[in-house]
Image (tube, rainbow, N blue to C red):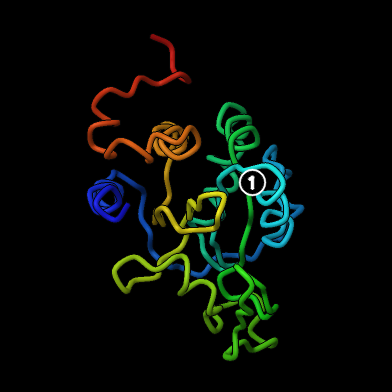
Amino acid sequence: MLHLMRPLLLTLLLAPTLSNAQTPAKPTTATEHKSPIHWMSLEEAQAAAKKTAKPLFVDVYTSWCGPCKMLDAKTFQDPKLAAYVNEHFYPVKFNAESGDPVTFKGQKFENPDYNPAMANSRNGTHHLTYQIANVQGRIAYPTVVYLDSDLNVLAPVQGLMTPEQMEPILVYFGEGHYKNQEYQAFLGGFKSRWTAP
């Protein structure tokens, strides 16, 4: 599997994205942007994947990250993207700097550096973030992590993307093409279903 992911990660890291700068932004609440994506907790997604096998789509964000807010306000509001994510994935929002402990694959992960007084600004990084969203030793926000139904990390994809940039990645993982085709080969034959011919 690693031989499939190496070219994918390089391609995705080099994909055109908007700035990933970590500029503090006004914190938003989860209800500020009503999302058409049916977000669930990590625990709910793990339980659902045991019953019906589907990959997980994990949005790893922080409360202060401007590009994370743009991903919510623009990309995740796209009706075609949202419908695709809802149908093919268990979508999860995970605050990379949360103070809440999380159980993932039977192991408890915490954020020992969490400071409640800093809840809406830069804070300690949750240990689950290091476990699933690390790309060659680098953590960045936003990161969308694709996991298979057994909760194995397929690829953490860093940076703000448009729906058009995200579509081939969604199809690659959502329809299982990663199981038998390298991303570059898949991308070479990919035709968008969301744009007019």
Q: Residues within 10 Å of mark 1 (few under 14, many from 20)?
A: many
Q: Where is residue 160 in the image (x, y as percent from the top left)?
A: 43, 50
| Residue pictured at 44% horizontal, 65% vertical | 133
Q: Where is residue 138 in the image (x, y as percent from the top left)?
A: 34, 71
The C terminus lies in quadrant: top left
- Residue 36 versus residue 106 in the image, above or below: above
Q: Could you tell me how many numbered marks the image carries?
A: 1
Question: What kind of element bears circle 1?
Answer: strand
| Residue pictured at 28% horizontal, 47% vertical | 4
Is 48 left, or right, of 94 in this rendering? right
- Residue 71 versus residue 21 in the image, above or below: above
Q: Which residue lies furthest to the top in this view?
A: 197
Q: Give the residue pinned by disc 1.
A: 90
Q: Position of residue 194 (x, y in %)?
A: 48, 20
Three-letter residue code for mark 1: Tyr
- Residue 73 versus residue 62 in the image, above or below: above
Q: In which quarter of the image is residue 22?
A: bottom left
Front residue of this view, candidates 89 and 2: 2
| Residue pictured at 22% horizontal, 48% vertical | 7
| Residue pictured at 48% horizontal, 58% vertical | 152
